[in-house]
Image (cartoon, rainbow, N blue to C red):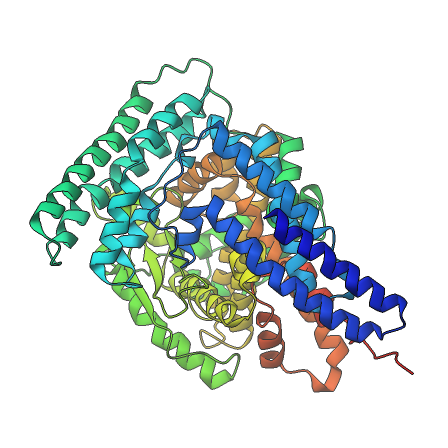
């Protein structure tokens, strides 16, 4: 590594000398960009050595068989890695790079600073039992067809060797863990242990691996499954009289927001903006509800409280929903409808060669969100994209009814826009087309979630749902979810908002069903900052779009904006904005 860093220093020195000799800035920039791209390859290889599970998740399978034990030595190595990379990054003149490499540089620097801060300051490894979970990586190795099954199963077997040591070390590291995160860890581990306990054995039956070797593999799987169950049992029995609060506190929250969201403003400023946005939405929803009232309530008097009569209209519209057993199939039917509408309106080019598979949400992912998209990593661009749908099986009838009223016939369509087309699925397909691996690997959650929210608005503005006021009203209700995600997350983690206050706010002001509000409380108690990504990203993309539209004037085309914006990959919006409005470098050579 030291040898390569010295070589980088020589590259930079050589290019600086060229500048002194009067060579054009444009030519120098090209050379600096070439050196930086070579450095990126080195950076990623070192990143994967230190994060083999992350490597597997993005489709880089060189380290599939490696499971690092999360001890002090491993963390010290991570911090050392971050410091070395920050030193290397500081050697590059960012202003001489092209737009794509500038963004990569920003992303890499942010990631290394974040890694160091998370390890040395946030110390989540001490209080979050759910941060220790190997099951997802094993499920990826088992389920993704990137290599012959026998080869993947042998990697699976080798990786299992360290599972007992991994969880024993986890037990040692935990100190007064958060109670809510302890419960989540128990739920996810007991729900997902079947990947190792039974799914692995089922897959072995489909191979020609010799019986003697299979026995060794199955024996290790039994030991591994036992270690996972023992970890869950340890957490259940843990005496924790003074658990750490799940609330981060304002100082940690602001810093985490800075690294995770990479927004133009602070968390406090974003919260203030969300409060203003919800006031606007309430006014617009009142206008629509007043218009719809006679259609659904005839001559009944309109309640004086605007939130009350908005809620009455929404509650009436929410009665239209699918049966519990039809929830996933209804989502499957929605995808071709969205595809046809986008083509008809010419909003964005879709790639029909990239499959989208709707599936039941895997057990190891349960407990955080009811619907999500899992995309293939940048190294596995031909892999499947999954639309994960939470199951309602076993739910009490009242809870299922509450959930389905939340995801009624109108909202279900908007959900599919957000998660699939032209939301997450479409954006992630474009991201994987980007030549920059860095932007795919170090993807910005606020841009990804913000695009999904912005795409909902585009679809509604384009007339999706036959321009019905009911659809617009229900989108406003759905959009309030993004806004209140920010208000909730900030109020809970930097303040003292209680569960009772949160649920009341979400049900009365954001018009959410009880089941949705209860689920959101659970989510805010086991995560932090991520809930702000939806509104933050939307706000910045919407602002960028308005500026772009004004600049383009008569040449403006929505499709052109969408595809240009998406072409930069999953980068922070503030850097995409800088690139979209940048002036190309001019050759100054005489």
Rendering coords of residue 505 (x, y %): 53, 40
Q: Residue furthest front?
A: 3
Looking at the image, residue 354 sits to the left or right of residue 268; the answer is: left
Q: Position of residue 261 (x, y in %)?
A: 61, 49
- Extreme left residue here? 211
Q: Quadrant of residue 568?
A: bottom right
Instruction: Give above or below for 170 relative to 484.
Output: above
- Number of marks: 0
Residue 553 versus residue 349: which sits nearer the camera?
Answer: 349
Q: Quadrant of the C terminus?
A: bottom right
* Residue 321 appears left or right of 211: right
Q: Position of residue 488 (x, y in %)?
A: 55, 40
Asked whether the viewer can see residue 248, the reply is no
Q: Is residue 508 visible?
A: yes
On screen, residue 193 above or below 545: above
Between 332 and 161, the residue placed more toward the observer is: 161
* Residue drawn at x 69%, y 59% as measured from the top left: 574
Residue at the limit of the structure toward the right, as seen here = 590
Query: Observer-nearest residue: 179 or 29?
Result: 29
Across and down, in percent, residue 47 comes to: 52, 49
């Amino acid at each position: 590594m030291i040898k390569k860093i010295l070589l980088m220093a020589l590259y930079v020195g050589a290019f600086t000398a060229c500048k002194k000799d009067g060579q054009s800035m444009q030519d120098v920039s090209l050379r600096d960009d070439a050196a930086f791209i070579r450095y990126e390859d080195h950076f990623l290889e070192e990143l994967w050595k230190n994060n083999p599970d992350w490597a597997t998740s993005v489709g880089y399978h060189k380290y599939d068989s490696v499971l690092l034990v999360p001890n002090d030595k491993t963390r010290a190595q991570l911090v050392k890695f971050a410091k070395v990379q920050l030193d290397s990054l500081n050697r590059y003149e960012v202003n001489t790079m092209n737009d794509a490499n500038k963004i990569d540089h920003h992303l890499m620097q942010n990631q290394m600073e974040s890694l160091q801060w998370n390890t040395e300051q946030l110390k989540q490894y001490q209080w979050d039992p759910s941060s220790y979970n190997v099951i997802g990586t094993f499920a990826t190795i088992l389920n993704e067809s990137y290599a012959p099954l026998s080869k993947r199963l042998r990697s699976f077997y080798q990786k299992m060797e360290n599972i007992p040591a991994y969880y024993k070390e986890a037990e040692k590291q935990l100190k007064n863990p958060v109670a809510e995160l302890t419960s989540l860890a128990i739920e996810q581990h007991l729900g997902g242990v079947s990947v190792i306990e039974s799914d692995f054995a089922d897959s072995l039956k489909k191979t020609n691996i010799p019986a003697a070797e299979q026995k060794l593999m199955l024996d290790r799987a039994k030991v591994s499954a036992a270690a996972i169950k023992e970890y869950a049992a340890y957490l259940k029995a843990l005496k924790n009289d003074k658990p750490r609060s799940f609330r981060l506190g304002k100082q940690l929250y602001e810093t985490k927001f800075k690294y995770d969201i990479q927004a133009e403003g602070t968390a406090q400023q974003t919260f203030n903006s969300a409060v203003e946005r919800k006031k606007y939405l309430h006014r617009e929803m009142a206008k629509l509800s007043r218009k719809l009232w006679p259609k659904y309530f005839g001559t009944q008097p309109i309640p004086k409280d605007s939130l009350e009569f908005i809620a009455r209209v929404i509650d009436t519209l929410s009665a239209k929903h699918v049966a519990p057993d039809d929830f996933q199939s209804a989502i499957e039917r929605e995808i071709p409808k969205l595809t046809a509408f986008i083509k008809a309106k010419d909003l964005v080019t879709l790639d029909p060669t990239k499959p989208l598979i709707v599936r039941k949400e895997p057990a190891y992912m349960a407990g955080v969100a009811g619907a999500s998209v899992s995309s293939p990593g940048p190294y596995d661009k031909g892999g499947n994209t999954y639309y994960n749908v939470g199951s309602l099986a076993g739910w009490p009838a009242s809870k299922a009814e509450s959930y389905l009223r939340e995801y009624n016939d109108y909202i279900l369509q908007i959900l599919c826009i957000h998660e699939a087309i032209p939301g997450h699925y479409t954006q992630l397909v474009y991201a994987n087309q980007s030549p920059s691996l860095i932007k795919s690997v170090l993807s910005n959650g606020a841009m990804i979630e913000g695009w999904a929210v912005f795409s909902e608005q585009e679809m509604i503005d384009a007339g999706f749902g036959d321009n019905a006021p009911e659809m617009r009203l229900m989108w406003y209700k759905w959009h309030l979810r993004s806004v209140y995600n920010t208000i909730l997350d900030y109020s809970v983690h930097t303040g003292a908002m209680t569960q009772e206050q949160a649920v009341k706010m979400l049900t009365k002001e954001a018009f959410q069903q009880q089941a949705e509000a209860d689920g959101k409380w659970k989510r805010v108690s086991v995560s932090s900052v991520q809930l702000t990504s939806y509104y933050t990203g939307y706000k910045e993309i919407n602002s960028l779009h308005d500026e772009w539209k004004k600049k383009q004037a008569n040449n403006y085309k929505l499709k052109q904006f969408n595809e240009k914006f998406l072409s930069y990959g999953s980068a922070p919006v503030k850097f995409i904005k800088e690139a979209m409005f940048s002036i190309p470098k001019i050759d100054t050579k005489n």
